[in-house]
Image (cartoon, rainbow, N blue to C red):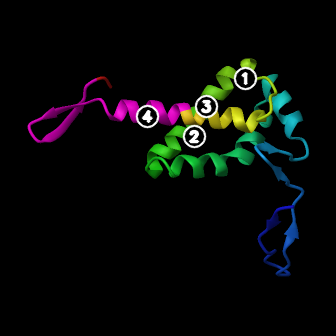
Amino acid sequence: MAIQPADEENNVTQESPVRLTGHEVSRPGFKEAVSAARNGDALAWEELYLWLYPRLTSYACARLDPDRASEAVSETFARAVAGIGRFTWKDSGFEGWMFTILRNVIVDMHRRSGRVRRVGRHRSVAAFA
């Protein structure tokens, strides 16, 4: 079980019901939240966002500057909302699906950033923005 920070009032740490096993998040209600999100439940998407945002952001920050990392995570969730109908449970689960989307977003961002025109010795306006 994951340990949460100390409670400020009584300075006692509390165990969380969160268990991370492999790539799957085994949080109580996680699969139900994914099912509800698939049915268009905005609150379920908010819950999934709160659960996954820290790990997705950490992954993105290791590969991009902080502003672009935040943009990548936002784009990941936008693509997930648009494509939730194509999601199927596999070994990597929903979290693995989200990381695959994020990886693709990051690759797309790197490709776009590499498409710049050079004017003399300095980079200029993006060629294909």
Question: Where does the image place residue 18, in percent across and percent down from the top left?
Answer: 85, 54
**What mark, if any, has residue 84 been given in the picture?**
1
Looking at numbered disc 4 in the image, what kind of residue is underneath it? Met
121 lies left or right of 39: left
Mark 2 falls on what kind of element? Answer: helix
* Residue depth check, mark 3 versus mark 2: number of the one nearer the observer: 3
| 99 over 6 or under it: above or below | above
Q: Residues within 10 Å of mark 1 (few under 14, many from 20)?
A: some
Q: Which residue is disc 3 drawn over?
A: 101
Circle 4 sits on which residue?
A: 109
Label 2 environment density (alpha carbons within 10 Å; few <14, some 14–19, many ≥20): many
Q: CA distance from mark 1 to mark 4?
A: 22 Å
Estimate the spatial distance between the alpha carbons at disc 1 and disc 3, rounded to whole Å.
Answer: 11 Å
Which circle's residue, 3 or 2, is located before the other in the chain?
Answer: 2
Is any part of residue 30 visible from this angle?
Answer: yes
Q: Earlier in the sequence, mark 2 or mark 1?
A: 2
In this rendering, the label closer to the viewer, 2 or 4: 4
Which residues fall within the magenta stretch? 104-127
Task: Measure the alpha-carbon separation of dots 3 and 2.
Answer: 9 Å
Q: CA distance from mark 2 to mark 4?
A: 12 Å
Q: Which quadrant would residue 102 be assigned to in this image?
A: top right
Q: Residue 73 bears which disc, if any? A: 2
Q: Does the stretch in magenta take in 109?
A: yes
Q: From mark 4 to mark 3, how far is it between C-alphas?
A: 12 Å
Give the percent coordinates (x, y) of residue 115: 29, 29
Q: Position of residue 58 (x, y in %)?
A: 59, 52
In-front residue for pair 119/39:
119
